[in-house]
Amino acid sequence: MTEDAFLAGLRKRLAPAHRRLVLGIGDDAAVFRPQPGRDLVFTTDMMHEDRHFLRGYPADAVGWKALARGLSDIAAMGARPEFTLLSLALGAWAKEKWVHRFYDGFLALAAAHGLPLAGGDLARAAHTSLDVVVAGSLPRGAAFRRDGARPGHRIYVSGLLGGGSLGLRQPRNRSARLRHLRPDPRVALGLALRKRALPTAMLDLSDGLSTDLRRLLLASGVTAHLDGEIPRFPGATEDDALHGGDDYELLFTVRADARVPASLAGLPLTWIGTIHAGNAGLCLRHGHPLPPRGWDHFVEHRTP
Amino acid sequence: MTEDAFLAGLRKRLAPAHRRLVLGIGDDAAVFRPQPGRDLVFTTDMMHEDRHFLRGYPADAVGWKALARGLSDIAAMGARPEFTLLSLALGAWAKEKWVHRFYDGFLALAAAHGLPLAGGDLARAAHTSLDVVVAGSLPRGAAFRRDGARPGHRIYVSGLLGGGSLGLRQPRNRSARLRHLRPDPRVALGLALRKRALPTAMLDLSDGLSTDLRRLLLASGVTAHLDGEIPRFPGATEDDALHGGDDYELLFTVRADARVPASLAGLPLTWIGTIHAGNAGLCLRHGHPLPPRGWDHFVEHRTP
């Protein structure tokens, strides 16, 4: 049972869409529409000891990354982050010093985005784990979804890929290590893309290009031809760039006639492929199927 | 380090209140104010294997209770539940059948409250744990907080206390066991109390009367004289009623001249004490200090 297969099964069990719930399970974030105001978007992400981090990781990096993952989802919706909630379960080994350093990292990234920590939950447990909720807002109906890619649309990616994976493999590579431990969620880019109304579909690259692109293709019911060069983080292999997780760049599609700047919000934007009619979810790289070999949260992985 | 002491320390580290964040850490839920519309309230609650439930518990009861805890927080704010998010980490022992029964319970309670599951996160982990977010809405400024109790106000509790604790001690007592495994969050009562604008302060009883009342007293900076008889669940001891958790009744204060009906939304309302000026957090029961002996999420407990 993969995560995507399980979610597909679950979705069938859920009640039909709620009056004010515009977008439910299966995107980067849920969209809630209060009566008059702006739409609100919500995302929730868990991290578990030994799966997403190790005891030996710098505690402030764990806190930073915990929030970065949620902020990246908010960025992928094109929303402005509004507040965050943190549920933290502490294993016996996580002493007061660790907890304070964890908050150092979490609150540093929150402060960088003017984001208040609005509440949460705290407990002792057998293992250290946490769950972060980030809420954002945006104009009514303006959220970027995964299901808007149509044949002819062009596929773009921000920044350079493979750095997260490289930093995991080569901890001595400082810039890659930083990329792995303290990813920089692309909030400003998400807002800039919304301002220009460029994307027809968008998501963030958290689990690897091959796996995340497949999600966009499945949601939109289309095929991709991924024939462009993938912009690579210095030192990263093609495999890192295609399948490595933890990059937190944005992947989006635009109409063929859209004018996409070479860079936006300080990040290069690279045309890497094109959407075609065809099997939903299929991605062809130079004519050959590209299997989704990124991170699946429902299969056993180990953090090295 | 207790949970309350830790939270007090944490609160000092947080940035000053955000423009649209009306109420932050330290109440049952956070309150967010979108520009024009209704206020939104958010609560998040974790549950961990071996701490909040055992593998042998009926999976649907675990799912039910996971949502009930959050709904109870929303009820305590006097809000209408709007949607929920569920993050679920599954230990290797939790097979597909368990997961489906878990959702049976979760979705049954959600359906009873017309509540859509808007999204969440799903992963495999070493232990089974989960985090539930419930969002609710209410008119601007109408949320019931913990800090509004003033000298002279009367302390009320809904329903009968001690059933949750009794059901944990005596699994063969069916009605108490049901109370423990499938608590019934007092959403309708919370809404009815808001309609009458009765409470000056309110919270839900999740960790035990002595511990939860102390939180209200600390937040309001007052003392309580708890001299009334505590309405007890059939078979529950005075200790169950004073210190037992998992009752999910509402505890609230009202002005001395308020007209409180004997029952509301089908639940008895009982006057159990009075607020006095004095040491913040102190509760006197028949003249003697009542120590907070309920559940502290930050101290090691075991689920029997």
Image (spheres, coloured by chain):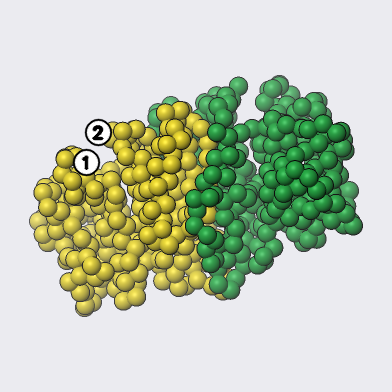
Chain colours: A yellow, B green
What secondary structure is found at the residue carrying circle 2?
A: loop
Q: Is residue A194 above or below residue A53?
A: below
Judge whether residue B229 can be spotted in this image: yes
Q: Chain of mark 1?
A: A
Mark 2 Cα shell of 10 Å, populated few (<14), some (14-19), many (≥20) = few
Residue in the picture at 75% in, 59% down = B194
Q: Which residue is mark 2?
A: A304
| Residue A199 numbered mark, or none | none
Residue B82 in the image: x percent, y percent?
Answer: 59, 57
Which of the 4 image quadrants contains residue B268? top right
Q: Position of residue B276 (x, y in %)?
A: 82, 47
Q: Earlier in the sequence, mark 1 or mark 2?
A: 1
- Chain of the residue that carries numbered disc 2 in the rendered image: A
CB of mark 1 within 8 Å of CB of mark 2? yes
Residue visible at 47% across and 62% down? Answer: A82
Q: Is residue B162 visible?
A: no
User: Who's the residue at 43% across and 62% down the image?
Assistant: A114
- Give percent across and percent down for residue A231: 14, 58
Q: Is residue B100 left or right of residue A289?
A: right
Q: Residues within 10 Å of mark 1 (few under 14, many from 20)?
A: many
Is residue A229 left or right of B259 when viewed as pictured?
Answer: left
Residue A44 lies left or right of residue A178; in this view the side is: right
Q: Position of residue A77 (x, y in %)?
A: 38, 63
Report helix, strand or loop for mark 1.
helix
Q: Is residue A136 above or below residue B283?
A: below
Distance Cα–Cα, label 1 vs label 2: 8 Å
Report the residue marked by disc 1: A168
> Disc 2 marks which amino acid?
Pro
Residue type highlighted by circle 1: Leu
